[in-house]
Image (tube, coloured by chain):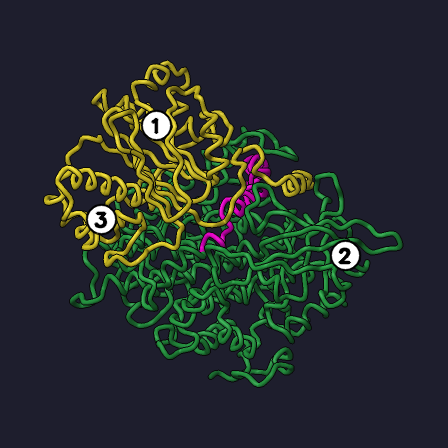
Chain colours: A green, B yellow
């Protein structure tokens, strides 16, 4: 085990599996080894144990206990408050070992705590920040949860909300009920987006930080378990507040800051979700490779599966390129990251869902297996919709993107300067991230700017070979699509404040999301220039952009010879050698 | 003879919508109340209005080129009527004009509505029948065949049946066996279309219990925890229409209209930013 400086956060934890090392790559490796070989039937944190817990509709207690002893919750606490959170891209990387094993574990004993705490990191006073940090560091990630306000077209998780009216003499009185809240039964710290104004509008809600132990007896009722199809083992249940008095000091930020805080902090969530669930699909692609290569001479899958396996691997790298770019933008471009964040959350879960369906053809009957070898496939099929929140999640992102399209078309696209190159370098240093710096004020589409620059640079590489020429053609197709989007979006009516005016805007926002995915791939590929790595080879970018282009219906050149074989070759090599299928190419346990 | 095969909450009875103007009320009711709706018609019913469309090119969008380049008039007109049926059905669900919708295709060929993931769609046609499935709960797949199509179990057994299915079908008298084989075929088509994969997913890799209606692995073990529902309905007096639908379990909003989908709080904040 790698040794490192003992973080302040770990000092207070009970004797555990040793301190987490300081670097992101090292910490990811630390958790990977801690969780151990997923295929080892004796491993209490392996696939068999996690699937069995899911089957019993229980959280995986032994694995949660292990992660608590390892001080995982410190990953969600900013460093200046005693934790290890310095950058969102590092956080996503560190969490991938959890998500590769169980997306529900990654949510239920991981990022949902941050979804809650983030409003406090962004706008809490010193006392609130220290208090939430202390609770997480001492009690683990299951202690803090978020109580969402109701969003348009809400599903069960986003439905209903709490209200808080001003109490005579200060403070608030909270009422309301929500039936499907993750960790509602075990959390003692609630970050509540409560309605504080009857009128709709940008200042309708406020954030309250509630300590269950401080509430008067009977004012908070914990409701029965909500049985869910996805994340079956996660502890979803309800909460009801009945005339619950809350002190004035519970207010996070100012009265009316709720919607703004949601928009500012959700952009981190919108990058983290794609940036972690790719790891779940990594594991499922691994199952498909296993199914396709078992009993095959030389470990080569049957020819009919080559295009599917290589294609899904290319999509996974494209999704990761978009997620990592968004995660890095949060540190590097905190005013403009919201655009990439919303686009990534709109685009990546949708592509990954399509990938699972493609992989179902390779898995065939094994796709229905409930055993430890292949049961992870059906589990992810169930869990992924919960992770992305389906249409309600999409609609929330569209509510950010659609109002910006006319202004982007008129002021940013084909005008904005390119972002710094290190945006696309997964290993390059970045300025420290600060939740307090996040805004939604910027209006520059840096990824479209980078696409235009990338297309020019790739155009000059045409003579290098057919794959480079194909990539240049693809880049041109996407630039042409930007021009078409610009013409159509410039003609949209200015955003209205309460409803969708022109339904075509939603379709255009979805197309824009796919263009940004392509832009991120090209940025990442160009950033690898000269490294001689697989990511430096144009093959994966050609395949990824071809697939994105076909989805958009833009002109796509024929795949040059060798592209599928190169991508498949890397996939099989990583499978054989136990390396992750993401941009980081990390060694895996087992 | 409605044949409902289900381990989930069932499938709505398909609704005949004879023209673009509807009636759409049953579709609204089924979609809101049951989470999905199935529409059928004949392309002959829809064609006159389709050809009279003043904005046909705009309405067909990226399908315009394919429409224009299809030489066989029957194929061309059926293609036109089927695209209009999807667009009008989706437009009814989203409560928008049909020309505001773009119809796009996934890599596997499944049609979808970019920007509007509140409804999933599936299309089938056979003979002069057109049918569209629409769901707000998850994936949906529809498949139709002429009811009198003779599907011989002995010829198709190896290609489409799991051992469990073969054991159920083999002892049946010939007439029943042929009918059950046809029904099974349409169910398998509907299921693989719901997954967007068509026949790339081998038909012997999954199966149905003809008796209980459950989705099964080839060895007869259950392959679903109740998320899937299947049904076969006779329509137009001469076709079998099978539906496979998935419920992802998110309990999504009943409201599928486009106008209300953007959160007013987020919208108002984004729209009030300084420029």
Q: Is residue A395 magenta?
A: yes
- The CA span between labels 3 and 1 is 25 Å
The percent position of residue A397, horizontal first and vertical second, equals 55, 45
State the SS at label 2.
Answer: strand
Q: Which residue is mark 1?
A: B40
Q: Which residue is mark 2?
A: A244
Which subunit holds the residue at mark 1? B
Asked whether the viewer can see residue A563, the reply is no
The percent position of residue B89, horizontal first and vertical second, equals 42, 28
Near-viewer residue (B120 or A492): B120
The residue positioned 47% from the left and 68% from the top of the image is A98
Callout 2 crowding tier (Cα within 10 Å): few <14, some 14–19, many ≥20: some
- The CA span between labels 2 and 1 is 53 Å
Number of dots carrying numbers: 3
Callout 1 crowding tier (Cα within 10 Å): few <14, some 14–19, many ≥20: many
State the SS at label 3.
Answer: loop
Q: Quadrant of the C terminus of chain B?
A: top right
State the SS at label 1.
Answer: strand
The percent position of residue B196, horizontal first and vertical second, equals 32, 44
The residue positioned 52% from the left and 40% from the top of the image is A413
Q: Which residues are magenta?
A: A384-412
Q: Earlier in the sequence, mark 3 or mark 1?
A: 1
Q: Main secondary structure of the magenta part?
A: helix
The residue positioned 65% from the left and 57% from the top of the image is A239
- Answer with left or right where residue A196 lies relative to residue A277: right
Q: Which residue is mark 3?
A: B203
Above-or-below relation of A489 to A246:
above
The percent position of residue A380, horizontal first and vertical second, equals 41, 58
Q: Are marks 3 and 2 on the same chain?
A: no
Q: Quadrant of the N terminus of chain B?
A: top left
């Amino acid at each position: 085990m790698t040794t490192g400086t003992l973080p302040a956060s770990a000092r207070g934890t009970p004797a555990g599996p040793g301190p987490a090392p300081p670097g992101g790559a090292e910490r990811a490796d630390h958790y990977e080894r801690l969780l151990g070989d997923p295929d080892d039937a004796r491993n209490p944190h392996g696939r068999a144990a996690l699937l069995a817990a899911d089957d019993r509709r229980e959280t995986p207690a032994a694995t949660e206990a292990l992660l608590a002893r390892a001080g995982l919750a410190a990953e969600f606490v900013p460093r200046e408050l005693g934790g290890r959170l310095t950058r969102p891209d590092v956080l996503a990387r560190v969490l991938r070992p959890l998500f590769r094993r169980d997306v529900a574990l990654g949510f239920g004993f991981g990022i949902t705590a941050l979804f809650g705490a983030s409003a406090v990191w962004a706008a809490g006073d010193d006392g609130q920040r220290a208090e939430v940090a202390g609770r997480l560091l001492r009690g683990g990630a299951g202690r803090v949860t978020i109580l969402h306000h109701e969003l348009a077209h809400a599903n069960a998780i986003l439905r209903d909300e709490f209200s808080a009216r001003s109490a005579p003499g200060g403070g608030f009185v909270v009422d309301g009920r929500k039936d499907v809240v993750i960790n509602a039964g075990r959390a003692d710290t609630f970050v509540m987006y409560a309605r504080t104004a009857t009128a709709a509008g940008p200042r309708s809600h406020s954030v309250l930080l509630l300590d269950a132990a401080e509430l008067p007896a009977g004012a908070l009722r914990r409701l029965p378990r909500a049985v869910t199809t996805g994340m079956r083992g996660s502890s979803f249940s309800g909460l009801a507040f009945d005339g619950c008095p809350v002190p004035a000091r519970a207010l996070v930020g100012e009265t009316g800051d709720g919607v703004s805080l949601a928009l500012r902090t959700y952009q981190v969530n919108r990058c983290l979700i794609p940036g972690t669930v790719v790891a779940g699909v990594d594991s499922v692609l691994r199952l498909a490779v296993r199914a396709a290569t078992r009993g095959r001479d030389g470990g080569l899958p049957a020819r009919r599966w080559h295009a599917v396996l290589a294609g899904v691997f290319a999509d996974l790298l494209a999704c990761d390129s978009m997620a990592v770019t968004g995660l890095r933008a949060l540190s590097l471009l905190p005013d403009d990251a919201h655009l990439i964040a919303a686009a990534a959350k709109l685009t990546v879960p949708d592509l990954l869902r399509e990938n699972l369906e493609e992989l179902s053809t390779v898995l065939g009957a094994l796709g229905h297996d409930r055993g430890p070898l292949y049961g992870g496939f059906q589990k992810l099929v169930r869990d992924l919709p919960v992770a992305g929140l389906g249409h309600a999640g999409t609609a929330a992102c569209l509510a950010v993107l659609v109002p910006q399209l006319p202004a982007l078309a008129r002021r940013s696209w084909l005008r904005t300067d390119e972002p710094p190159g290190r945006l696309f370098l997964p290993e390059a240093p970045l300025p420290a991230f600060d939740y307090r710096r996040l805004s939604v004020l910027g209006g520059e589409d840096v990824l479209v700017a980078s696409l235009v620059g990338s297309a020019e640079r790739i155009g000059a590489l045409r003579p290098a070979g057919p794959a480079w020429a194909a990539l240049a053609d693809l880049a041109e197709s996407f630039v042409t699509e930007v021009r078409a989007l610009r013409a159509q979006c410039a003609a949209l009516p200015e955003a209205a404040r309460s409803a969708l005016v022109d339904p075509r805007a939603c379709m255009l926002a979805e197309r824009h999301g796919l263009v940004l995915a392509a832009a991120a791939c090209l940025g990442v590929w160009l950033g690898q220039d000269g490294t001689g790595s697989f990511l430096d080879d144009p093959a994966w970018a050609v395949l990824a952009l071809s697939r994105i282009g076909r989805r958009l219906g833009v002109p796509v050149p024929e795949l040059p010879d060798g592209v599928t074989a190169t991508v498949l070759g890397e996939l099989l090599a990583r499978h054989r050698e136990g390396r992750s299928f993401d941009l980081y190419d990390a060694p895996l346990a087992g | 003879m409605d044949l409902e095969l289900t381990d989930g909450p069932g499938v709505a009875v398909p609704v005949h919508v004879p023209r673009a103007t509807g009636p759409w009320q049953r579709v609204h009711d089924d979609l809101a109340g049951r989470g999905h709706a199935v529409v059928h018609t004949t392309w002959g019913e829809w064609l006159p209005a389709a050809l009279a469309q003043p904005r046909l090119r705009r309405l067909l969008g990226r399908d315009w080129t394919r429409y224009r380049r299809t030489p066989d008039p029957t194929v061309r007109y059926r293609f036109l009527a089927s695209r209009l049926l999807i667009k009008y059905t989706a437009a009814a669900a989203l409560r928008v004009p049909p020309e505001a919708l773009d119809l796009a295709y996934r890599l596997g060929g499944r049609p979808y509505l970019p920007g509007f993931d509140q409804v999933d769609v599936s299309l089938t046609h056979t003979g002069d029948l057109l049918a569209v499935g629409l769901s707000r709960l998850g994936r949906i797949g529809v498949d139709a065949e002429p009811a009198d199509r003779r599907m011989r179990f002995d010829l198709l057994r190896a290609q489409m049946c799991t051992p469990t299915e073969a054991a159920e079908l083999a002892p049946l008298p010939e007439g029943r066996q042929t009918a059950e084989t046809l029904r099974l075929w349409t169910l398998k088509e509907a299921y693989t279309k719901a997954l967007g994969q068509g026949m790339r997913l081998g038909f012997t890799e999954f199966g149905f219990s003809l008796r209980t209606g459950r989705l099964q692995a080839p060895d007869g073990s259950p392959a679903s925890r109740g998320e899937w529902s299947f049904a076969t309905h006779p329509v137009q007096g001469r076709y079998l229409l099978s539906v496979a639908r998935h419920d992802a379990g998110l309990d999504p909003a009943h409201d599928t209209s486009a106008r209300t989908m953007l959160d007013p709080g987020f919208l108002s904040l984004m729209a009030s930013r300084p420029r």
